[in-house]
Image (tube, helix red, strand yellow):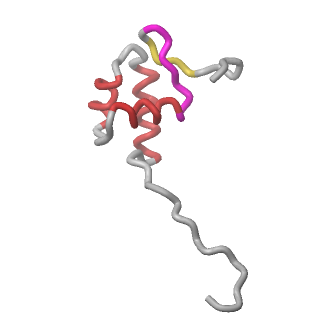
Amino acid sequence: DEGTVEPKPQNAGRKSAFSAHALRRLEADVERHPDATLAELRERSRVKVSLVAFHRTLKKLGFTRKKNLYVRMSNGDPM
């Protein structure tokens, strides 16, 4: 430790419950079933997370709820 000026490694935080493969499957499922509820999508995904965590994952993938459908956000939509 003595004599170095390099920063100490930072904690990268919690690992995602969704693997890359699970995210691709989720994306395809939402495209096939845009009118599905969060609970239905979560059940089909078989990923053990809360509905809030599931919603945040969909948002990170670019999906938003419009009336009763999940759709991709366009670049012009304000956040």
Q: Quadrant of residue 45?
A: top left
Q: Is residue 51 or residue 63 the one in the foreground?
A: 51
Q: Quadrant of residue 75?
A: top right
Query: Residue 63 magenta-drawn?
Result: yes
Residue 60 in picture, x, y percent from top left: 53, 35
Query: Residue 34 magenta-drawn?
Result: no
Q: Is residue 23 above or below residue 38?
A: below
Image position of 9 (left or right of 43): right
Residue 35 in picture, x, y percent from top left: 39, 13
Q: Total marks drawn?
A: 0
What residue is drawn where x is 38% and y is 32%?
52
What residue is drawn where x is 61% and y is 74%?
8
Q: Is residue 17 above or below residue 60?
A: below
Image position of 28 (left or right of 76): left
Image position of 25 (left or right of 1): left
What residue is drawn where x is 42% and y is 10%?
68
Q: Residue furthest bottom?
A: 2
Q: Is residue 3 or residue 17 the one in the foreground?
A: 3
Which quarter of the figure is the C terminus placed in? top right
Q: Is residue 48 or residue 2 the one in the foreground?
A: 2
Which quarter of the figure is the N terminus placed in? bottom right
Magenta segment: 60-67
Q: Residue furthest top?
A: 67
